[in-house]
Amino acid sequence: MLEKLEKQAQSCTKCPLCATRTNTVFFDGSSNAKIMLIGEAPGADEDALGKPFVGRAGKLLNEFLKMADIDRQKDLYITNTIKCRPPKNRKPEPAEKAACEHFLKEQIKAINPKVIILCGATAAESFFDKKFQITKIRGEIFDNVKGYEGIKFVPILHPSYLLRKHSQDEGSPRDLTLKDLKMIKKTALL
Ligand code: URA
């Protein structure tokens, strides 16, 4: 079913991003994973390779996953809110997210993860209506997201943000992100 969905995404023309994409970026990791990670959108490296989180932010994400003892290929199913790269790496437009939403919904339904990591504010905005500050809600467990009962959602800081924050001191964004990932691993009972 996911293979069929990925093929549909590859030929999708529902929004203008299809005209500028090199590859659709559907997923990486395992479809048996207990944890799903949803990022913002593919960047240039992801567009070139057809896999999410393979550029600078992805390499930093990999380092954090390793430190939290989460296996990217076995424990995670990684995707983004949209499957095609927005030009100049701008944020996805609401219309682009809306056109692509059914793919994400079907992915969640098929994977049925215990925990969904919302990586950054753009991913969190796809599931929470209210205005929020990602720095305030990161690390919280939300288990009442409408339409996704039984799944725990945990927002975390985006690795692109962490690329600009180097401190690893107690309470720093990097320190908090590592703690969030360790908590997520426990929550998913890996
Ligand atoms: N940033 C994202 O949000 N997703 C990717 O796939 C790469 C970078």
Image: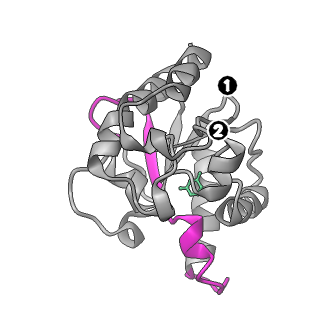
Residue at the disc numbered 2: 189
Q: Which of 49 and 116 is in front in this view?
A: 49
Residue range corresponding to the magenta coloring: 143-172
Q: In which quarter of the image is residue 169?
A: bottom right
Disc 1 marks a residue whose amino acid type is Asn
Q: Which of 106 and 112 is in front in this view?
A: 106
Q: Is the magenta stretch mostly helix, strand or loop?
A: loop
Left or right of 140, for residue 31: right
Left or right of 58, for residue 10: left
Answer yes or no: is residue 53 visible.
Answer: no
State the separation of the CA atoms marked 2 and 1.
14 Å
Secondary structure under tag 1 reads: loop
Left or right of 32, for residue 164: left
Residue at 64% in and 66% down: 178
Quadrant (top left, top right, bottom left, bottom right) of the C terminus: top right
Ligand 1: quadrant of the figure: bottom right
Residue at 43% in and 63% down: 90
Q: In which quarter of the image is residue 132?
A: bottom left
Residue at 40% in and 61% down: 121
